[in-house]
Amino acid sequence: MAYNAPWFPPDGCIPDADAEWLRLQESWIGHAPHRFYAFLQRKTDGAFVGDVCYHFTPDRNWWDMGIVVYAPERGKGYGTQGLHLLLDQAFRVDGVPRLHNEFETTRDAAYHIHRAAGFREVGETDGILQLELTREEYLRGRA
């Protein structure tokens, strides 16, 4: 969570109470395709290793997405697996036409898994990289 540290000092952990997490889950879960949220869970032991989400951004006419793998679980392939599960949900199940993600240019692992999944760069501003993937691009690569 170090990348959240500037907004949630000192360590980037969001200090919301359990009631706030419940409210957030209720507003996100069951609202696809405009909002989607899911936990990433390891099959072998059922442990939660991260989460994925997307939501419609009307002023940009795209769906912004996010993927978080908890720090102790990074480097084990869960980011790649989670991203592919999210893409299948968005493009094959919910029919989302375009996903967008943005993150710091210094996040090499995030960059590589997005590029390997077919995302293309659409811009960079102040060290924030913009990436995008359309449904057609994704399905063409997975036909």
Image (spheres, rainbow, N blue to C red):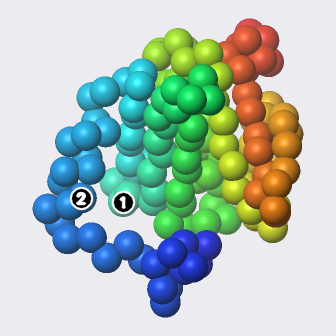
Q: Nearer the viewer, residue 61 or 41?
A: 61
List x then y, in percent, for residue 20: 20, 61
- Three-letter code for the amino acid on which mark 1 is drawn: Ala
- Three-letter code for the amino acid on which mark 2 is drawn: Trp
The disc, 1 or 2, on the residue closer to the chain's N-terminal end is: 2
102 lies left or right of 10 = right
Q: Nearer the viewer, residue 83 or 56?
A: 56
**In this rendering, does residue 88 appear at all?**
no
User: Residue tagged by mark 1?
Assistant: 47
Residue projecting furthest to the front = 59
70 lies left or right of 84 = left
List x then y, in percent, for residue 104: 74, 62
- As drawn, 80 above or below 29: below
Q: Nearer the viewer, residue 108 or 21?
A: 21
**Mark 1 crowdedness (10 Å alpha carbons): few <14, some 14-19, many ≥20:** few
- Which quadrant holds residue 65? top right
The image's mark for residue 126 is none
Quadrant in the picture for the C terminus: top right
List x then y, in percent, for residue 87: 59, 29
Q: CA distance from mark 1 to mark 2?
A: 19 Å
Residue at disc 2, secondary structure: helix
User: Residue tagged by mark 2?
Assistant: 21
List x then y, in percent, for residue 78: 58, 53
